[in-house]
Image (cartoon, rainbow, N blue to C red):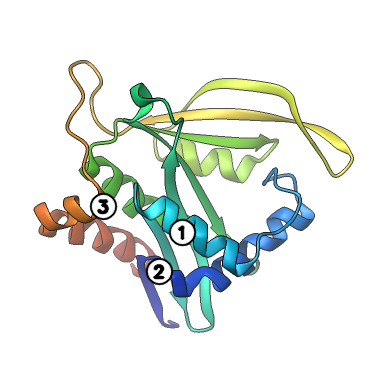
Amino acid sequence: MSRFSLRTATLDDAAGIAAVYAPYVASTPISFELVPPSGAEMAERIARVTAHAPWLVVEEEHGVTGYAYLSRHHERAAYQWSVDCAVYVANGRRRAGLGRALYTTLFELGRLQGFCAVHAGVTLPNVASVGLHEAFGFVPVARYPKVGHKLGAWHDVGWWQLELNPRDQAPPARRSPTDAAREEPAAWAAAFEAGRRLFLG
């Protein structure tokens, strides 16, 4: 087994994250971006996201091979308990369990922060991505037909939703990643261990 680390991303990971992401931008409609972001731009994104929610990386022997994060679903205040998720795995490391490990930790951290619902937007068709999300309990909630044009074609995007905390009552207090880790250190650490254990067996 090669070296494996599942941890919170730092600004030093920006170049490695950008390298994982670039093929999705350049060669597929999975990302609707058209120009791969630079390492510097990715560092800005990491700083912005991690002030609000977790951004995780998997690092193996040759560097970053996967990452996942939660981001704001919308800026309006009433959306504050909802987030979007994304996961990307390097070419050559897909179907190795990295996405499952990252999401296992990510969603538990989001729950500990007090988020209630997480959403995944998937460019269709994408059997692997749909299968991954539905394996975690996501349910389809919407489909935007021909909402984006890339690589010479129009693409549909489907939306899936997963409940992290119950929504049949007033929402829980939300906490920053720093506060949640400080106030519940054992649960925060256990979330990382759950993801690592899934990958390492």
Rendered location of residue 146, percent (x, y): 76, 25
Rendered location of residue 84, percent (x, y): 46, 38
Tell me the quadrant of the picture where the C terminus can be found: bottom left
| Residue bearing mark 3 | 177
Instruction: Say what secondary structure mark 3 lies in.
Output: helix
Q: Which is nearer the eye, 46 or 115?
A: 46
Quarter holding residue 161: top left
Is any atom of residue 40 visible in this view? yes
Amino acid type shown at disc 1: Ile
Q: Residue at x 18, y 16 (%)?
A: 169
Amino acid type shown at disc 3: Pro
Quarter holding residue 113: top left
Answer with mark 3 or mark 2, whichever residue precedes in sequence: 2
Real-space Cα separation, disc 3 to disc 2, in angstroms: 14 Å
Rendered location of residue 56, percent (x, y): 40, 60
Q: Which residue is drawn at 71% across and 54% down?
A: 25
Amino acid type shown at disc 2: Thr
In this rendering, is residue 60 above or below 17?
below
Real-space Cα separation, disc 1 to disc 2, in angstroms: 7 Å
| Residue bearing mark 2 | 10
How dense is the environment of label 3, judged by Cα within 10 Å: few (below 14), some, or many (20 and up)? many
Real-space Cα separation, disc 1 to disc 3, in angstroms: 13 Å
Q: Residue at x 66, y 60 (%)?
A: 37
Instruction: Say what secondary structure mark 2 lies in.
Output: loop
Contact between labelled residues 2 and 1, with CB atoms less than 8 Å apart: yes
Answer with mark 1 or mark 2, whichever residue precedes in sequence: 2
How dense is the environment of label 2, judged by Cα within 10 Å: few (below 14), some, or many (20 and up)? some
| Residue bearing mark 1 | 46
